[in-house]
Image (cartoon, rainbow, N blue to C red):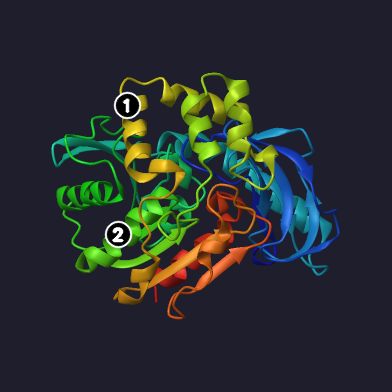
Amino acid sequence: MSEAIKPIVMPKWGLAMQEGMVAKWLVEEGAAIGSGEEILDIETSKIANVYESPVEGPLRRRLVGEGETVPVGALLGVVADASVSDADLDAYVAKFQEEFAAHAAEAGAAAPEPETIEAGGRRFRYLALGEGEGAPIVFLHGFGGDLNNWQYNQEALAEGHATYAVDLPGHGGSSKDLGSGGADVGALASAVLDFLDAKEIPRAHLAGHSLGGAVALDLALNHADRVASATVICTAGLGPEINMDYIDGFMQARRRKQLQPLLEMLVADPAMISREMIEDVLKFKRLDGVETALNRIVGDSFAGGRQALDLSGRLAELSVPVQVIWGRQDRIIPASHAEGLPASIPVRVFDDAGHMVHMEKAAEVNQLIKALVER
């Protein structure tokens, strides 16, 4: 009978997440829900987001009330059809709660931590998750970001695949010294090759966001032998326009009140941006060498308020599978850059998402990446 009962549990959005608060139920008890349907608003210390149901069927029980905070993996609700009795539901819930209490501490203690490696004369911080045969998936974040930008994606895609989320030079826990060469997309692509060499990765599936998307495209075009596929998300490198008010504001922001409206520009729903997320970005910006490194990247990549690199005219040369994903409400790089691309490149634009579409529409984006990787 337990197979007919499907649990809905508190998701784990990133390795740092230990608990979440049910901000709002979007469906009532007794309602039929579909897989992928938005059923909950969940808030964490890092971010707030909508939770899409992993199962389908009638929602028989809501076990956590609005405003309650519970650990990752805790039972939020159960789905079962009318053939399952209330007594069977009670027994299932009691058994789940008992087993969860016994294993929760052990699960929390086993969470992997980011590692570092020397590559090409600089330090890279990365998070490795999963294992599997074939080329691994390597995640490349955007300007001012870090490996935590993939907190909604890496763990889901690590099921059956080795994955690496990497801090690009000048970002996160990687070296802030960009060296004596350039700090443009090509230089960052060369740094990624150094990382792949150090990890003895001959070929990788790349998932790149914004500036990291341009790095992925550069590698796919100029080092196709090292790229198995590339998914680029709200990517730079496909047109000259970029919101320099955001870039300049990000560089100049020193306080929370200055940074908050800028980070809210990244998403369609400003409520996603939490206070702790803002504080984390401010802490990063205060690290030694960060301002110099980011200014060099801005100068080499966005000189004169425009993108220095436009690869759109070369996309017909691609010899590896590439797909493009965008949020139509992107206020940093216009979604119109996804128009007019070669017919061989699939394009998916989400109407109700912004520049961080891989976080705003994580389940759908993860499925698109997985489909391309497993093609």
Camera-side residue of 301 and 84: 301
Which residue was labeled with disc 2? Answer: 218
- Using the numbered discs, state the Cα–Cα distance from disc 2 to disc 1 in whole angstroms: 24 Å
Q: Quadrant of residue 72?
A: top right
Label 1 Cα neighbours within 10 Å, binned few <14 / some 14-19 / many ≥20: some
Q: Quadrant of the N terminus?
A: bottom right
The residue drawn where x is 69% and y is 53% is: 92
User: Position of 102 compared to 106: left or right?
Assistant: right
- Give the left or right position of residue 82, taking residue 92 as reference: right
Q: Is residue 186 left or right of residue 13?
A: left
Q: State the residue lying farthest toward the left.
A: 121
Instruction: Out of 48 and 29, give the one closest to the viewer.
Output: 48
Q: Residue furthest bottom?
A: 343
Residue 116 lies, in percent from the top left, at: 25, 36
What secondary structure is marked by label 2?
helix
Q: Is residue 135 visible?
A: no
Compared with residue 112, is residue 204 higher up or lower down, i.e. above or below? Answer: below
Residue 328 in which image quadrant: bottom right
Decide which of 285, 162 is in the foreground and name it: 285
Tell me the kind of residue under disc 2. Asp
Question: Label 1 sits on what residue type?
Answer: Thr
| Camera-side residue of 72 and 312 | 312
Residue 369, image x and y in percent?
45, 65
| Residue plotted at (61% across, 51% down) | 354
Q: Is residue 70 above or below residue 2?
A: above
Quarter holding the C terminus is bottom left
The residue that appears at 45% across and 43% down in the rendered structure is 305
Q: What secondary structure is found at the residue carrying circle 1?
A: helix
Q: Which residue is mark 1?
A: 292
Residue 41 image position (x, y, % from top left) = 72, 44
Up the image or down, 284 lies above or below 166; here it is above
Q: Residue furthest front?
A: 304
